Structure formats: C-alpha cells, structure tokens
Image (tube, rainbow, N blue to C red):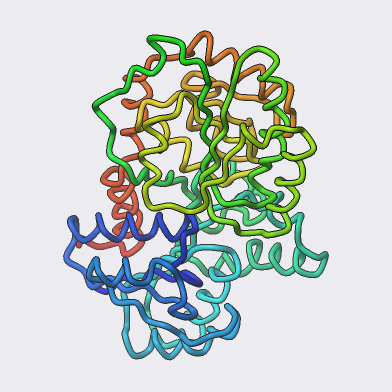
Amino acid sequence: MKIFFRISKLGFGGAEQVFLSIAKELKKIVEAEISFIVDSKNGENVKTAEELGFRVISLEANRTMSSIFPLKHLLDSEKPEIMVSAYTDTNAACLISKVLSKSHCKVIVSEHASLKEHWGKKSILKRYILRFYVSYIYQLASKVICVSNGLKNQVVSLLGSNTPVETIYNPVRYRPYEKIVERNKERRPILQLLAVGRITEQKDYSTLINAIPKILKYREVSLTIVGGIFCEKEYSKLKALITSLGIESCVHFVGYTDNVAEYYKSADIFVLSSAWEGFGNVIVEAMAFGLPVVATNCNYGPSEILEDGRYGRLAPVSDSYSLAKAILEEAERPLINRSDLISRSTEFSEENIASQYFTAIKSTLDEKI
C-alpha cells in the first residue's frame, strides 16, 4: 500500500513533527510505502524523514496553489491508496489535485490550528477564500481530522455533516520520563519557569513576560523560553518589553534546540501563555516529564489536555495578573502529583495516536489492510 503525507514543507512546525511521528509508528503497524510530498526540499526535517527511510518528493512549487498540477501528475503516476494532508491551503490544493487526476486515492485532510484566531490575522479576501475551502472544498475529502474537540466543532459549524469529521489528538514525541526529579521536595531559591514554542504573536509571550515582575514581588524567578525566532518583529518587541520592565536577568531566550528534554527535566513549572492553539503538544511533553503545567484557557486544546483544570491550572488569555497568580499557587501548592501527570501523558503516546490514524485510514479505505 502507498501512503502520501502531504505538507507544504518538512520544517520544525507542529504538524510536521506529528506527521513524522505517525509515519514512523505506521511502519510498525502496516506494510506500506510511505512518502512525504512537499512543495520544496528546504525544510529542516527533510533529512530526518529520509534517514527514517521515507521518500521525500518535491513538487518544485514556489507556493501551495501552484502545486496542484504537479501533484495531479504525481497521483496519476504513483497511484497511492491514501493521502493525508495538513493545513487549510494545502488541504484544498490536494483535493483539487485529486479531482483533476485519474487517481482513486482517498484524501484525509487535517486541521491543526484554531480557524477563527488564525484567520483573524489574514486579509478579508484571504479569510473569505479559507472559509470557502473549509465550507465547500472540504466536502470532497473522505474524512477530516481535527486535533482537538474544540477545533472539530469549529470545522463542523462550517462544513456541516456531509463529510465525516473526527478528533485525533497529537502524539507526544517523548516517552514518559520514569525517573521523576522531585524538584518540589525542597523549595528552591529561584523558581524555574519554562516555556517552549516559536517566537510568534500566537504564543503571547508578552503576557508571560509581564507576569514576571508580579511574581518577583513574592519570590525570585527565572524564565527560560525555548523556541526558534519565527517572527523577528515579535522578538524585538519582547526584548524591548523585557528591558522596559528591568528583568533582563530573569528572562532567557534559548532559541531552537533538539535537546528540549533537558529543559523539561530541570524546570519547576511549565507555562503555556498562547492566545490560541490547535492542540498544545508542548503541554503533553511537559507532563511526560512530570512537570506541573500552568496554561491559558485558549482555543483550543489546553482545557482538553488538562481536563478543565484537573491536571494543571488554567488562566484567562492575555491576563498577566491571573497567570502570575496561577504560577505562584502551583509553586506553593502543586495541583497534582507528578506520577499522575506522567500517566495522563501516556494517553497521547505515538503508538496510541498512530493506531487511531491507522483506524481512520482503514475505515476510509473500507477494507482490511
């Protein structure tokens, strides 16, 4: 069987990591030839995919919509049984390619980010086009997969009930860290906070940075932010904010690193301050290390992962006072023990999530594989 994973590029983004994890586990479940179809081979994870034994096929397209005919020809020549794609533009292009081709390939599209918030940053014309894609073009899909129930409800409200829509959460890339570091047995003089994610407006690091002076009124604190600089303008804004608050010694930007695990192991509390998400993979990653979580109750994902506050504290979006309060409360009175956090994270294991994707593929093909 041939399976195509279609994504614009194999970079460090969340959907790219998810597809790599799922493809890796699918190889263990089913005998299949798995290929990644990209616009161009300029992504940071191209080499990783090839080292894992996957073909990476470039459509040599400078933008997603110009990939329609190259993909159409590829479908005709390769004849895959199933194609799984991610992101609205790419999903729409895949479906159009499928219609134009002679292929009998089934197409499963997936959404990984809150549509309302993501589209809100686009022009009026672009928002109209994206809405048209989801409301009408998605009807050509065999199935739509969303990474949270909140996102699923959003898609269903636009698409209706003609196309099956289901939720499959994202997998966590780390196995549960059994050797739990008992960081809270003794209060450390400096509270170590960790945030992980690219420097973008979506992550709303300004709210987290504004929370630091409020925490400093009660105890010393250090914030480490791990993530590549996706937006230079946002990074400059954050650096200026840190300077204006006089907390240069308290906030540290690490940039992108392959070794995030060491930061999870050494932190006291993980903080997600996002304005919106599709899921929030990094929350599950932190839980896999038994790391307590404080997150904004943004659309969508955090409240589902944390079960409305059972597994971590939730604070309102863009509210630095509430975020600081939640962090201080967690530091003084941990909400849940670390072994329970680790246990919860296993529900999002690569094996479990890949098995759900396999079931989705199997039901779409309507045959025994």
Image-quadrant location for residue 223:
top right
Q: Work out whether residue 275 or residue 143 is closer to the camera in this orientation and state it.
A: 275
Could you tell me which quadrant the N terminus lies in?
bottom left
Tell me, yes or no, if residue 235 can be seen here.
yes
Left or right of residue 309, residue 215 in this image: right
Could you tell me which quadrant the C terminus lies in?
bottom left
The residue shown at (62%, 56%) is 159
Q: Work out whether residue 324 or residue 158 is closer to the camera in this orientation and state it.
A: 324
The residue shown at (60%, 19%) is 220
Question: Above or below — where is 40 with respect to 127?
Answer: below
Tell me, yes or no, if residue 152 can be seen here.
no
Image-quadrant location for residue 128:
bottom right
Question: Above or below — where is 173 with respect to 39?
Answer: above
Residue 368 point in image, percent of width and height: 20, 60
Question: Above or below — where is 284 with respect to 182?
Answer: below
Residue 209 point in image, percent of width and height: 68, 34
Residue 323 point in image, percent of width and height: 66, 24
The residue shown at (39%, 87%) is 74
